[in-house]
Image (spheres, grey):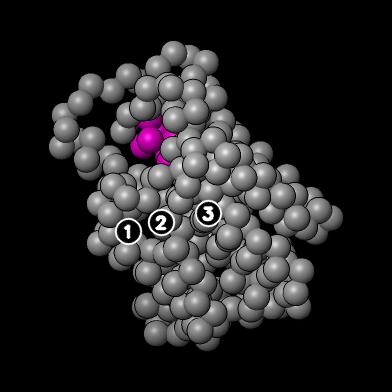
Amino acid sequence: MDLIQLIILSLIQGITEFLPISSSAHLILLPLLTEWQDQGLAIDVAAHLGSLFAVVFYFRKDISRILFAGVNSIINKEISKPDSKLFWCLVIASIPVLASGFLLRDIVSTYLRDPLIIAAASIGFGLLLWYADATGKRIRQVNSINMRDAIMIGLAQALALVPGTSRSGITMTVALMLGLDRKSAARFSFLMAVPVILAAAGYESLKLVQMDAAVDINNFFITALLSAISAFVSIHFFLKFLDKIGMLPFVIYRVVLGVILILIFI
């Protein structure tokens, strides 16, 4: 993979990871539409690590506060404080996707990477996002999230194993349906990304070690750096302009992408 391809792939990964348009779909479609070679497992690990660094750095104050509260709740058995409750809601919300990802990873990689499946998921879940954004009451904030909310959002996150669904998109969809305002829905979704991306990067790293494959350090560093920068910028501007633009631009993009894929691959 040459430098230009590496740069494009890294930027796409970083930009799409946290926007409600499905990063997995774009990474699957890129080699199909361009006939580029598969980027390889090492580049996947680097891209995930870059995205992970971006979201952890962006929410570093929130994450450190939540982790401290979570550890304190374990030691003192006190979960009534807002940050302690949020910690356990994030834990509960992460279980479904981690469990289903472990159990269904072979099925997903074998049967669900078809462009027409991606098209259907992009359109269907995109329209569902539009409905949630248009009809949601948007009166609740992150600290109001309870265990029931966490379970519902967590179960929805498991659907993101289907390429084209979008992990951030489906979690924000359900959060909006539950009455959260846009920024609170996005913030909870982004915080949920930390254990998911960490698990994905850890699993891919383990496979890479088992394969004993040679890793191009320069390409690895370039991918991680560009993914981190583009993901950080994506998070920043998404949250900055979310209340002004809403979800409609992303819905339109998803529907157009889905229609184009149907026209190409049907």
Residue 88 is covered by the magenta coloring = no
Q: Quadrant of residue 95?
A: bottom left
Q: Which kind of residue does numbered mark 2 sit on?
A: Leu
Query: In the picture, which quadrant includes the N terminus?
Result: top left
Q: Which residue corresponds to the image point at 15% horizontal and 37% vertical from the top-left? A: 210
Q: Earlier in the sequence, mark 1 or mark 3?
A: 1
Single out the mark in the foreground, 3 or 2. Answer: 3
Question: Which residue is nearer to you in this view: 106 or 54?
Answer: 106
Whole-number angstrom distance, CA of label 3 to CA of label 2: 14 Å
Please give the label number shown on residue 101: 1
Q: Which residue corresponds to the image point at 37% horizontal and 77% vertical from the top-left? A: 74
Left or right, 55 with reference to 178: left
Left or right, 213 with reference to 79: left
Q: Which residue is mark 3?
A: 120
Q: Main secondary structure of the magenta part?
A: helix
Query: Label 3: few (<14), some or many (≥20) within 10 Å?
Result: many
Q: Which residue is mark 2?
A: 161
- Look at the numbered disc 1 and give the secondary structure of its residue: helix
